[in-house]
Image (cartoon, rainbow, N blue to C red):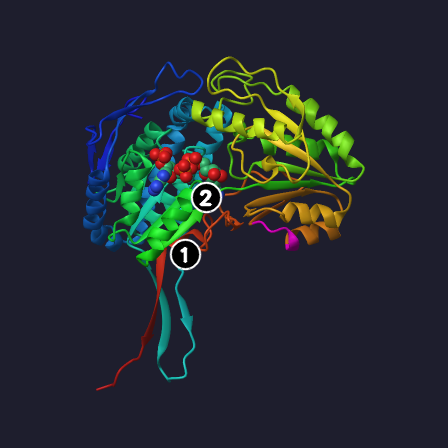
């Protein structure tokens, strides 16, 4: 990285723009909010419009570049990701708060995603069909979607942008990227890396600023498609705006992910999976385990062992050795979690354990394990923090019904050694990701990722080779040989 932390700036048409049309703001370290990481310019609707204009201009030359040349730039981006992994991980921890180990994990997967999508770009996705007309060939080709708007959240600030940027760029699209306001400098570092990898001017444009600036971008008729990860209300608003002008939209939204534990399960595995799934990344994962459904006899022992595991988690500054749980991303996020916990207590949830290792600071929140009933608000609404609730089910049927009793459908896990139950889970749990004897969290970059119900939109899955489906249009060509002279 040229400078650490990087100088906050928009990237528009290849120029780094440090002036903010709406002023400047500070990026804060949630472990020490009194020690800002750096400042960055705040853009407005005009900034978004300039960036879209740059993406429109760069589109013809980028899409006509041979796919191999585009792939080579992504491969170079992967190499730079590996080279800069320490700096990127540190910046991720400084801005987002997660532990250095978690940040390193993200950097590794981000590099891997660039490498994988570069390889996918080199594979033919054309198809040939038989035809009733002698000599005529029917062939499908994929063309780039066009100008793509990318809007990303702060909780996986290295990886989620790359999930979107890598296939979008590989497929020949130009991009306007609006990252979350809590992690602006990390997005500058990623954009700089892509420029250093050889991305031509205007192919990737980065605009820093508030949600309203993102709103202006998605409303822009010149933006052919928008891929968004974030909260349900914002995602639904974006969907309405983009589909109203017949644009394409991809949404990855919230979750309320169940983990069912049966009495034939390996209990050590189940405890580690349920606690890790709930508390990892300070519970700020869309796939985090929000409800643990303990079936029958396993309930009491599971609760006891989970409580013991939550109690000894080490909360602290993500940079320090031994820290397992960092702070929440901001004081505002902490307030939201604390309010949800107050509601749970008022509704009769029993706090089985409240971890006591968190240092003082406005963004720290003590990992908390509740025992409760499925009707609690905390068992229905997503609480984006280190809070999980164990509920009891008396039978397999009840456990499956409880697991599916949610508006969300992102991930679900089941701990059992019974093959029939496993097969039932794969077919009957209403979630895009089903994990067996593993936490609700975690996914591989070469397999499709996405949810059902209110957790996702209806566009193609992210990641894997399905990622290309959103970022391309399919054309069907009927080719006749003509008349021989
Ligand atoms: P938000 O929806 O608040 O923000 C996401 C992004 O949208 C940010 O860049 C934000 O900008 C931007 N934004 C806000 N308002 C608008 C608007 N009106 N128009 C366009 N863009 C806008 O979500 P959070 O950042 O709070 O992220 C947490 C949420 O993301 C959780 O619900 C979580 O479950 C979900 N998530 C889902 C994942 C999945 O794959 N399904 C993965 C990870 C998270 P700004 O920061 O400036 O407000």
- Quarter of the picture containing the N terminus is top left
Q: Quadrant of residue 20?
A: top left
Q: Is residue 193 above or below residue 69?
A: above
Q: How many marks?
A: 2
Q: Which region is colored magenta?
A: 427-431
- Disc 1/disc 2 C-alpha distance (Å): 23 Å
Image-quarter location of ligand 1: top left
Count neighbours of disc 2 (C-alpha within 10 A) and say few if under 14, some if 14 to 19, many if 20 or more. Answer: some
> Which residue is rendered at x = 31% and y = 41% of the image?
214
**Residue 296 coordinates in the image, percent (x, y):** 79, 40
Confirm if mark 2 falls within 8 A of ligand 1: yes
Magenta-highlighted stretch: main secondary structure?
loop
> Which residue is rendered at x = 74% and y = 33% of the image?
267
Q: Are marks 1 and 2 in contact (CB under 8 Å)?
A: no
**Residue 386 coordinates in the image, percent (x, y):** 56, 28
Q: Quadrant of residue 442?
A: top right
184 or 33, nearer to the observer:
33
Q: Quadrant of residue 45?
A: top left
Between disc 1 and disc 2, whose residue precedes?
Answer: 2
**Residue 185 coordinates in the image, percent (x, y):** 32, 27
In the image, residue 30 lies in the stretch drawn in magenta: no
Count neighbours of disc 1 (C-alpha within 10 A) and say few if under 14, some if 14 to 19, many if 20 or more. Answer: some
> Which residue is rendered at x = 43% and y = 26% of the image?
332
Q: Is residue 133 above or below residue 292?
A: below
Instruction: Identify the element where label 1 is drawn.
Output: helix
- Disc number lying in front (1 or 2): 2
Residue 211 falls left or right of residue 280 = left
Residue 469: mark in rendering: 1
Q: Which residue is mark 2?
A: 232
Residue 145 falls left or right of residue 459 = left
**Residue 430 coordinates in the image, percent (x, y):** 60, 51
């Amino acid at each position: 990285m040229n400078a650490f932390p990087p100088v906050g700036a928009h990237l528009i048409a290849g120029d780094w723009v440090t002036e903010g049309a709406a002023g400047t703001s500070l990026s804060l370290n949630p472990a020490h909010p009194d020690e800002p990481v750096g400042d960055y310019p705040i853009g407005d609707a005009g900034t978004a419009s300039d960036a879209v204009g740059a993406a429109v201009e760069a589109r013809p030359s980028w899409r006509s570049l041979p796919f191999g040349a585009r792939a080579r730039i992504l491969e170079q981006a992967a190499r730079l990701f590996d080279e800069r992994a320490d700096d990127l991980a540190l910046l991720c921890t400084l801005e987002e708060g997660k532990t250095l180990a978690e940040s390193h994990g993200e950097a590794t997967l981000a590099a891997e995603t660039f490498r994988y999508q570069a390889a996918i770009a080199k594979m033919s996705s054309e198809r040939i069909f038989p035809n009733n007309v002698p000599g005529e060939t029917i062939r499908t080709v994929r063309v780039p979607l066009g100008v793509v708007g990318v809007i990303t959240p702060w909780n996986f600030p290295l990886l989620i942008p790359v999930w979107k940027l890598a296939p979008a760029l590989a497929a020949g699209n130009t991009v306007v990227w609006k990252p979350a306001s809590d992690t602006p400098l990390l997005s500058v570092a990623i954009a700089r890396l892509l420029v250093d990898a050889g991305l031509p001017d205007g192919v990737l444009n980065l605009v820093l600023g508030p949600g309203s600036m993102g709103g202006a971008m998605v409303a822009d008729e010149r933006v052919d498609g928008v891929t968004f990860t974030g909260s349900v209300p914002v995602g639904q608003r974006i969907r309405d705006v983009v589909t109203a002008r017949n644009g394409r939209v991809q949404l990855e939204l919230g979750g309320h992910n169940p983990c069912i534990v049966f009495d034939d399960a390996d209990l050590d595995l189940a405890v580690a999976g349920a606690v890790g799934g709930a508390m990892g990344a300070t519970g700020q994962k869309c796939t985090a385990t929000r409800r643990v459904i303990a079936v029958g006899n396993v309930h009491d022992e599971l609760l006891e062992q989970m409580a013991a595991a939550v109690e000894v988690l080490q909360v602290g500054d993500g940079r320090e050795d031994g820290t397992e749980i960092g702070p929440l991303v901001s004081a505002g996020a902490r307030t939201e979690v604390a309010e949800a916990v107050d509601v749970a207590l008022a509704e009769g949830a029993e706090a089985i354990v409240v971890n006591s290792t968190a240092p003082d600071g406005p963004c720290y929140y003590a990992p908390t394990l509740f025992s409760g009933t499925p009707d609690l608000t905390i068992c229905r609404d997503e609480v984006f923090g280190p809070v999980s609730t164990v509920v009891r089910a008396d039978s397999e049927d009840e456990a499956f019904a409880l697991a599916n009793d949610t508006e969300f459908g992102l991930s679900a896990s089941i701990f059992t050694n019974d093959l029939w139950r496993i097969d039932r889970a794969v077919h009957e749990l209403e979630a895009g990701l089903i994990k067996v004897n593993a936490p609700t969290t975690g996914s591989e970059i070469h397999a499709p990722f996405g949810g059902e119900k209110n957790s996702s939109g209806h566009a193609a899955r992210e990641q894997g080779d399905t990622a290309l489906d959103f970022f391309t249009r399919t054309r069907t060509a009927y080719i006749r040989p003509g008349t021989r002279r």
